[in-house]
Image (spheres, helix red, strand yellow):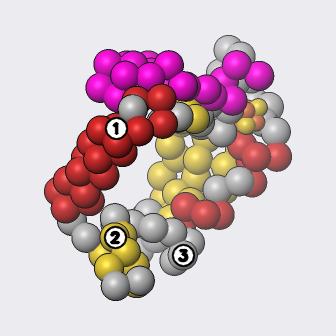
Amino acid sequence: METQVKQVETICSFCGTGCGLDVEVENEQIVKVKGHKENPSSHGETCVKGALGWGYIHSDRRLTEPLIRKNGKLVPASWDEALQLIAHKFSAIKESHGPDAFGCFSSSRSTNELNYLVGKFMRTVIGTNNIDSCNRT
Ligand code: SF4
């Protein structure tokens, strides 16, 4: 089989600094990550997380589908089944204990847009201001 090599320019998602990365991919597997020299904020630099923290991507221990505990055992489920279960449980908790029974930690590893959606969801759907994130540190 001929080796397929490509270089992908992207942004590191480990923290809010947003360093530019060049990702070397061989046969759909990442083999090397280095700083993107033309990135205006990082100029080719990265920290250890950006350069070396990608081994989990190809780990066979990574979750690739929802799991639901049935009879004490985690079993694969469809996204529809998992989301319906979550909605049912959230509704039951909210009804029994009120919206402030919930709290949510968002993440600097998510995009601004996802963090905004988490805030909107917690305030407008759940009805609580119990939201925090490592973004503020
Ligand atoms: S390389 Fe390091 S400093 Fe840059 S965005 Fe990634 S985690 Fe943050």
Q: Most extreme residue toward the top, as rendered? A: 40
Q: Quadrant of residue 113?
A: top left
**What residue is at 48 percent from the left and 52 percent from the top?**
6
Which three-letter amino acid code belongs to the residue tagged 2? Answer: Ile
Q: Earlier in the sequence, mark 3 or mark 1?
A: 3
**What residue is at 67 percent from the left and 49 percent from the top?**
33
Q: Earlier in the sequence, mark 2 or mark 3?
A: 3
Residue 29: x percent and y percent? 51, 65
Label 1 packing within 10 angstroms: few (<14), some (14-19), many (20+): some
Magenta-colored stretch includes residue 135: yes
Residue 111 shows in this picture: no
Going by the image, does 11 lie left or right of 87?
right
**What residue is at 50 percent from the left and 43 percent from the top?**
8
**Span colored in magenta:** 110-137
Which three-letter amino acid code belongs to the residue tagged 1? Answer: Lys
Which label sits on residue 94? 1
Which three-letter amino acid code belongs to the residue tagged 3? Answer: Arg
Q: CA distance from mark 2 to mark 3?
A: 17 Å
Residue 73 shows in this picture: yes
Which label sits on residue 68? 2
Residue bearing the label numbered 3: 61
Residue 46: x percent and y percent? 78, 36
Q: Is residue 92 above or below residue 73?
A: above
Callout 3: helix, strand or loop? loop
Q: Main secondary structure of the magenta part?
A: helix
